[in-house]
Image: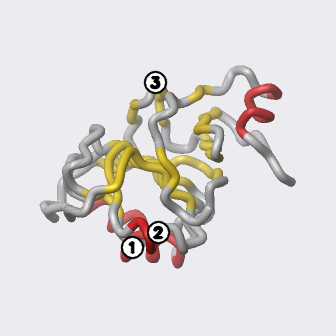
């Protein structure tokens, strides 16, 4: 079944709609799944852990506090996400290796590209409620993303 976020919004006006802040970096511009979350700042240690685990069609929402000074995702972590079945990532921060990300069958939306890697300090929180772009992202809720935007629902819409 082909879907679009406008069609889902029409059918489900109760959904949350994220502010249009995000650019597409992955090879898949349409993705959806149950939300898993991370809150971190310029340290992608928890992102590395999560993409290395079974994604089972989920979407990883990473609240990097909007910092684009350091990348929270690069080609190696994105390849791990594909290998482990993640549907996509929504990153309130930066990514790098954008040419490689575009070749992967993975949805990646982020604020910007930046070449600097993060420091690995083992910091960050996993499976906590996070909020940015006017939306509250709760682990277990559903995220739908395409070229039109990002929406969040309490239940599966498809």
Numbered disc 2: secondary structure? helix
In primary-sequence order, the first of circles 2 and 3 is: 2
In primary-sequence order, the first of circles 1 and 2 is: 1
**Mark 3 neighbour density, 10 Å: few (under 14) some (14–19) many (20 or more):** few
Asked whether 154 or 92 is in front, the reply is 92
Asked whether 36 or 82 is in front, the reply is 82
Q: Residue 130: x, y in percent?
A: 39, 35
Cβ atoms at labels 1 and 2 below 8 Å apart: yes
Q: Which mark is residue 75?
A: 1
Q: Residue 24: x, y in percent?
A: 52, 52
Please report the residue visible at 62 percent of the width from the left and 55 percent of the height from the top. Answer: 29
- Please tell me whether residue 100 is drawn above or below residue 64 in the rendered image: below
Which residue is labeled 2 in the image? Answer: 101
Please report the residue visible at 35 percent of the width from the left and 58 percent of the height from the top. Answer: 95
- Residue 25 lies left or right of residue 75; in this view the side is right
Cβ atoms at labels 2 and 3 below 8 Å apart: no
Numbered disc 1: secondary structure? helix
Q: Residue 119: x, y in percent?
A: 14, 62
> Quarter-wise, where is residue 113 in the image?
bottom left
Which residue is labeled 3 in the image? Answer: 134
Residue 36 visible in the picture: no
Q: CA distance from mark 2 to mark 3?
A: 26 Å
**Mark 1 neighbour density, 10 Å: few (under 14) some (14–19) many (20 or more):** some
> Quarter-wise, where is residue 131 in the image?
top left
């Amino acid at each position: 079944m082909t879907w679009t976020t406008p069609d889902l919004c029409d059918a489900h006006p109760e959904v949350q709609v994220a502010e249009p802040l995000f650019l597409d970096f992955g090879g898949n511009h349409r993705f959806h799944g149950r939300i898993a979350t991370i809150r971190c700042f310029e340290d992608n240690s928890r992102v590395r852990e999560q993409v290395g685990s079974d994604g089972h069609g989920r979407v990883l929402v990473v609240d990097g506090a909007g910092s684009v000074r350091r990348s929270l995702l690069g080609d190696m972590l994105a390849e791990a996400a594909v290998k482990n079945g993640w549907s996509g990532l929504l990153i309130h921060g930066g990514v790098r290796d954008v040419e490689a990300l575009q070749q992967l069958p993975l949805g990646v939306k982020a604020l910007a590209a930046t070449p600097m890697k993060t420091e690995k300090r083992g910091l960050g929180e996993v499976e906590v409620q996070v909020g940015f772009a006017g939306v509250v992202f709760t682990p277990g809720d559903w995220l739908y993303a395409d070229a039109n935007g990002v929406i969040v629902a309490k239940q599966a819409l498809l």
